[in-house]
């Protein structure tokens, strides 16, 4: 009989302070999960671990069973009912019999009744098939729990931020598993955790300690010292006992084994701890940042100046309708600005009703309260002309999520004269130029671009930028961790506590 691999994706980065709900439909960016053959069709050939799993299964000549592909933008925790609907297809596929399970997961998913959704999923798979090899690929922003480490045989994760190596991370996990099944290696796991929450604004390997750690991990893999080594700098906005910086290493029991893996793991975490002060992000006052961007742009910069509104990023659970940075940009009179995206379905409906070419005055954004961080939504009044209305259906062509289709919902461009504002029905992080181009704005021709993002914008926009200015607005993705009312976080932990 041919070998049978179960390949599944369930991904959600849960911001336990987010005001945004996470219904079943969210796990498809608005259209719900893909099931069965539709799951494979949706992700084959894309820059994703799921696609890598499919490719390795094909090269190994095994049958790929794909019960579900489900990914949602970060938001508040999903209900128990939604989680059960996501998990049941995977359990059914494993129960039907398989030779391996390969999972494309996030690593910071919290659901009703569980602070560790991935750990629960793995435990439930183990209960069905105790001896079946399980390989998992995690996001860079994983909060690794003991239950995850106890129930997976192979763990890999992204080494880049922006995450442009998702396929490579999946390929590494699947290749190790395939080699194990062929009798070439014998994977063993070592992992460790630190009482450290690195600011996500300091996670990128190019920005601080992560660069040295990732270089060490790559060299350990390249030399054959271990099979895989992964840094997981945590997702700070999930209030769980597992939130914190960790590392996980896959060793080969036939070459160094767990001792070599633990040694590499300890070396990685030692760097993170020794350089922990560099993981703290310190923001400038907003008015000062916008003024700096204006000065650079008005001086004739060779390319757009990026203003990064990082406190309201839907890619970490933000409402994407906080208007503080936009308001400051308009107040300081920046010219030739494109802004994306503002999530405001009501404003889109009003612009669609008015039609292209119509002049409208809108109460834009600010429709969402954020009670868990004590913020009220506050719209701003903006007048301008409706330039474009689109269906918001896009395909990513840049280095992140390459080939994946996504959905902004109906989208419209409001032109105030000085600024063109892309307004969408659904949240979406701007990591690809298509966010502007799909609605007729050429980002390379603008003097200024304001993006609601943290680091992922660098995938598509850093290559075209003359300068980058980070802007401290407001929202549930702020780098100031002191505003979050943590209840479950293990304390003491740096930098919230002196360690």
Image (tube, rainbow, N blue to C red):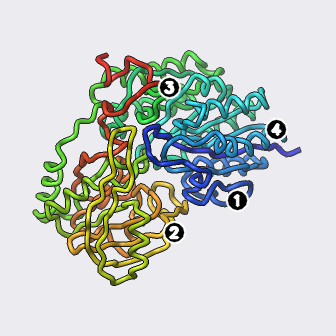
Quarter of the image that includes the C terminus: top left
Between disc 3 and disc 1, whose residue precedes? 1
Q: Which of the labelled discs sits on residue 393, or is there none?
A: 2
Q: Residue at x 52, y 32 (%)?
A: 221
Which residue matches tag 3?
242
Measure the alpha-carbon separation of dots 4 and 1. 21 Å
Which residue matches tag 4?
95
Relative to residue 307, is residue 246 depicted above or below?
Answer: above
Relative to residue 288, is residue 484 depicted above or below?
Answer: above
Quarter of the image that includes the N terminus: top right
Measure the alpha-carbon separation of dots 3 and 4. 29 Å
Task: Report crowding for label 1: few under 14, some 14 to 19, many 20 or more residues within 10 A (C-alpha).
Answer: some
Position of residue 82 in the picture relative to residue 387 (left or right): right
Between disc 2 and disc 4, whose residue precedes? 4
Give the camera-side residue of 350 and 300.
350
Q: Residue at x 69, y 33 (%)?
A: 134
Q: Residue at x 29, y 51 (%)?
A: 309
């Amino acid at each position: 009989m041919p070998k049978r691999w179960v390949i599944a994706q369930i991904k959600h980065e849960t911001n336990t302070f987010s005001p945004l709900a996470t219904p079943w439909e969210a796990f498809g960016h608005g259209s719900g999960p893909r099931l069965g053959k539709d799951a494979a069709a949706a992700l084959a050939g894309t820059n994703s671990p799921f696609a890598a799993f499919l490719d390795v299964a094909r090269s190994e000549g095994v049958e790929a069973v794909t019960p579900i592909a489900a990914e949602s933008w970060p938001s508040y925790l999903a209900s128990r009912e939604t989680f059960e609907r996501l998990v049941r297809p995977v359990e059914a596929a494993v129960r039907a019999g398989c030779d391996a399970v390969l999972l494309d997961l996030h690593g910071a998913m919290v659901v009703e009744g569980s602070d560790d959704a991935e750990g629960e999923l793995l435990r439930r798979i183990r209960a069905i098939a105790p001896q079946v090899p399980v390989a998992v690929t995690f996001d860079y922003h994983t909060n690794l729990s003991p239950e995850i480490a106890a129930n997976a045989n192979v763990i890999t994760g992204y080494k880049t931020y922006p995450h442009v190596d998702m396929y490579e991370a999946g390929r590494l996990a699947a290749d190790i598993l395939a080699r194990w099944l062929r009798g070439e290696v014998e994977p063993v796991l070592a992992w460790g955790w630190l009482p450290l929450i690195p600011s996500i604004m300091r996670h990128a390997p190019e920005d601080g300690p992560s660069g040295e750690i990732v270089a060490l991990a790559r060299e350990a893999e390249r030399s054959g010292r271990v099979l895989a080594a992964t840094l997981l700098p945590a997702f700070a906005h999930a209030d769980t006992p597992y939130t914190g910086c960790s590392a996980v290493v896959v060793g080969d029991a036939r070459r160094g084994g767990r001792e070599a893996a633990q040694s590499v793991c300890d070396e990685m975490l030692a760097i993170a701890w020794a350089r922990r002060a560099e993981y703290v992000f310190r923001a400038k006052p907003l008015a000062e940042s916008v003024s700096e961007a204006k000065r650079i742009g008005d001086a004739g910069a060779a390319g757009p100046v990026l203003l990064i509104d990082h406190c309201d990023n839907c890619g970490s659970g933000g409402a994407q309708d906080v208007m503080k940075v936009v308001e400051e940009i308009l107040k300081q009179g920046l010219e030739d600005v494109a802004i994306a995206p503002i999530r405001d379905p009501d404003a889109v409906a009003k612009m669609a009703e008015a039609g292209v070419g119509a002049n409208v005055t809108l109460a834009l954004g600010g429709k969402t309260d954020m009670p868990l961080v004590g913020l009220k939504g506050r719209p701003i009044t903006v007048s301008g002309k409706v330039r474009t209305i689109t269906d918001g259906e896009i395909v990513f062509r840049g280095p992140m999520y390459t080939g994946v289709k996504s959905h902004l919902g109906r989208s419209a461009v409001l032109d105030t004269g000085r600024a063109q504002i892309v307004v969408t029905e659904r949240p979406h992080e701007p990591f690809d130029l298509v966010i502007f181009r799909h609605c007729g704005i050429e980002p390379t021709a603008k003097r200024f671009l304001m993006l609601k993002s943290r680091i992922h914008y660098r995938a598509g926009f850093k290559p075209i930028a003359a300068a980058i200015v980070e802007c401290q607005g407001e929202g549930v993705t702020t780098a100031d961790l002191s505003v979050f009312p943590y209840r479950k976080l293990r304390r003491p932990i740096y930098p919230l506590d002196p360690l």
